[in-house]
Amino acid sequence: MSRALPRPPSPATALPFALAPTLAFALAVAPTLRAQELPSPLPATRPDRSESAERAVAAVLRNEARKSAVEQLESLVALGEAAIAPCFARMVGLAAHDASDEADAGGGDATLCRRALLSLPESAVTALLLEAAALAPDLEGQLAVLRGAGQLERASSLAVAHAVLRALDPLLVGHPIVVGTLRHCVAAVVAAEPEALRDVEALLLAAPLPFATALLDAVELRRADEARRFALRLLGRRGDLDALLIARLDAAPPRDRREHERCADALRDRCGAPEREVRRAATRWLRRDATPATAHVLIERLADPDARTAELALAALRAIGGVTLSAEPNEWEAWLAAESEWRREEGARCLELLETGSDAQLLAALATLARKRLHADAFAAPIGALLRHPRGEIRLAACEALARLDSLACLEELAAVVDDPDPRVAARATRSLHRSGANP
């Protein structure tokens, strides 16, 4: 015998249903009420919330006629938009309690109701969820709507998520349960619909910072291949978010040369941002880009009004240049000018020796070029050509030079010799690629 549905104990549930959704109560009793009428988080003022629709959905789910899952689904869809509210109530109330084996087999009331909602007009489902997001009177109801939107895995679910965030009590901004539910919702959507990233971008630009962090987490979790490009598109569009975006780009730097160049271009520009945290993060990242253009920007940052930014600029310049100069900008400007002059004269002669010099001259030129990290990208291809030299000693010296220059262009050259017949060359190339995080 089925158990009778008890009255909700909260005084709030005594109010009209449209003003006090009883989702929390539904969740509490869900395990024992699988096919009975459940309270819904959706508004009661619409015709599809009628008692007849509730009874019809409950009858389909009781399945006294022993219909197949396909036939049950057809019966739910045949009810039309009237089935939306009761199906959604059961989906969010039962999904967390379905036995895993039943859910995996495609059965269970929650799975069936989800499939029905996906078969009904998307515009009608979305409209009802948007209304529910606005009317839910408490956190429990808002979380139910957000969780259910994620289960539908549609781009339109992001509009529902936005509505929930707008309606949220300001005191709950950053609440860990809301953050986690939002992350799960968005991760489910972007995994199912990659094109939804544009909608995530719009939502992220409007969301409070704690929720923006959750949205970035969701993209990294489900669309890791897009995460860096996604972050680059957002740079400069929201000042309080830029430091977070750059920190993520620093933690997972580009492994593609073109993407690296786009990132460096964007961050050289952000070095002049009004926010000091953004300037710090951009300056820290630029230690990865050993180019004259970046060196020029870093020299300007030595005079930054923020002392920490100036310290980071000095550390980046020392890493790029391989020299230990003071924090005086004039010293670094003189160094940069001298490096440019060296590149035009001595650097050109060294490159010529790589093609025409004796083995001894070639090895000496390689040792000289390996100390000039500022010009690594320009030297990568000429040095890389020596990786095909017949002598193992020359190949090993070229490998060492590329490893010391340590740019993405150099790593691309090293990737070609991880299977070199000389085990010393193969080992050195593999070690360099592993250190950089690249896959040999």
Image (cartoon, rainbow, N blue to C red):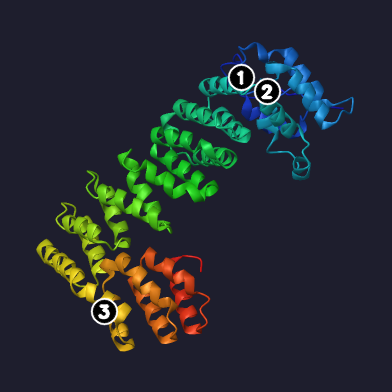
Image position, residue 342 (x, y; %) = 18, 71
User: Residue placed at 39% from the left, 35% from the top?
Assistant: 205
> Could you say which is closer to the camera, residue 136 or residue 366?
366
Give residue 373's quadrant in the image: bottom left
Amino acid type at mark 2: Leu
Mark 3 burial class by Cα count in 10 Å: few <14, some 14-19, many 20+: some
Is residue 360 shown to the viewer in this render? yes
Q: Amino acid at mark 1?
A: Ala
Q: Which mark is residue 124?
A: 1
Pointers 2 and 3 in contact (CB under 8 A)? no
- Residue marked by disc 2: 120
As displayed, is residue 391 above or below residue 337? below
Q: CA distance from mark 2 to mark 3?
A: 70 Å
Residue 100 percent coordinates (x, y): 74, 44
Quarter-of-image position of residue 325 = bottom left
Left or right side of 54 for 19: left
Check the image and name the residue furthest to the left.
Answer: 330
Q: CA distance from mark 3 to mark 1?
A: 70 Å
Label 2 or label 3, whichever lies nearer to me, is 3
Report which residue position mark 3 lands on. 368
Instruction: Please report whichever mark, 3 or 1, sits nearer to the chain's N-terminal start.
Output: 1
Label 2 crowd (10 A; few <14 / some 14-19 / many >=20) = some
Label 1: few (<14), some or many (≥20) within 10 Å? few
Indicate the amino acid at tag 3: Thr
Q: Position of 434 compared to 61: left or right?
A: left
Farthest-out residue, front? 356
Mark 3 or 1, which is nearer the eye? 3
Viewer-proximal residue, 102 or 79? 79
Residue 54 sits above or below residue 23 on the image: above
Observer able to see residue 3: no
Residue farthest to the bottom?
A: 360
